Amino acid sequence: MEIGFFVAAGKGSHTPPLDCNSLTMRPPREATREGLARASGDAAFAADCHARFVSMYRETVGVEVVPDDPWAQLRGAVEAVFRSWNSDRARTYRSREGIPDDLGTAGTIQAMVFGNRGPDSGTGVLFTRDPATGEAVLYGDVMFGAQGEDVVAGTHHTEQISVLDERMPAVGAELRRYAETLERHYTDLCDIEFTIEQGRLWMLQVRVGKRSPQAALRMAIDMAEDPDFPLTRADAVRRVAALLVDPPRVATERDDVGPALTAGLPASSFTLRLLRWARAPARAPGRRADRVQQSRRSAEPCAQ
């Protein structure tokens, strides 16, 4: 039986991702492709996996010829992960994020699932809230019959995450439950990657998501004001306190706006709004504290 492996830098090392999708193909590779086609009943799927493997291995590992030996393939992928630690991209990322150069990285090797195994398979990325506005709705993209690199590369047409509710409602409902569980576990916006293989949902990875300053304010207030969400008012203020130094400003210039209808508040209203909200008494503090502690104890990370 042929098995695919995913080799990547360990997420705990806080490095930008350098991933190598390595399909372990025993020599000769043509015979392996034929065997995979027989096992899956889909020659197109087998050919697609073979083409992806060869292309990505050459690009990521930096070789012209892909070795036939699966152990040599795996070793080459692992060494590429460790070399990525000293790449210009990784150095720039660590400098910006304040991560020491001597921290080092680790490698993660795990069995793959395939989003390109037919119309009931797919892959996608999502945020548990809109990272631009902070609205409490799932925000992301999904692509059917595809692998993860197709979504993030920006070279393929994707669909909004809401299409899952129409096309695969059971998977869509399951994904929403997992997204809520993960958000409560991290008490923050989550950036999630997932794959669907023949109707079965697999959660691949999660990280705390990036967001705009406007979204950061809205999320902090909404989460802290929700009596069932495990984020205290004090934690919410600390989370966005850095924005008080340089509050977000949004300016647009248009010549065809017509006469002014009313006068708006100045940009400093962001600071005033946050300070007023932070200083206002919390609602039902005793019951809220109990809910926060209970939510922290009950929140568990999603399992595959």
Image (cartoon, grey):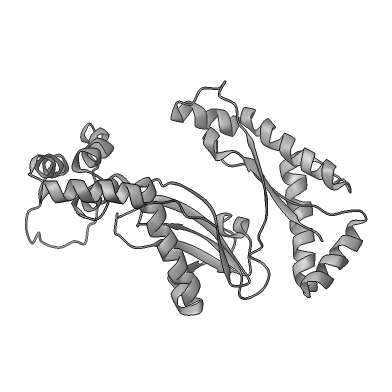
Tally of numbered tags: 0
Image spot of residue 266 (x, y percent): 12, 44
Would you say residue 214 is visible in this rendering?
Answer: no
Image quadrant for the N terminus?
A: bottom right
Quarter of the picture containing the C terminus is bottom right
Quarter of image, res 154:
bottom right
In the displayed structure, 71 sits above or below 53; it is: above
Front-most of residues 98 and 9: 9
User: Which residue appears farthest toward the top when viewing the image?
Assistant: 102
Residue 290 image offset from top left, x and y in percent: 20, 48
Q: Residue at x 53, y 29 (%)?
A: 92
Residue 270: x and y in percent read: 16, 43
Among all residues in the image, which is located at the extreme bottom? Answer: 166
Q: Nearer the viewer, residue 250 or 98?
A: 98
Q: Nearer the viewer, residue 154 or 65?
A: 65
Q: Is residue 133 left or right of residue 139?
A: left
| Left or right of 42 in this view: 220 | left
Residue located 38% across and 58% down the image: 180
Task: Tell me residue 162's x, y (percent).
Answer: 42, 71
Q: Is residue 12 in view from this perspective? A: yes
Q: Say left or right for 103 vs 37.
A: left
In the rendered image, the vertical position of residue 261 relative to residue 72, given as above or below: below
From the viewer's perspective, tell me whether residue 32 is left or right of residue 9: right
The residue under the point 13% across, 47% down is 286
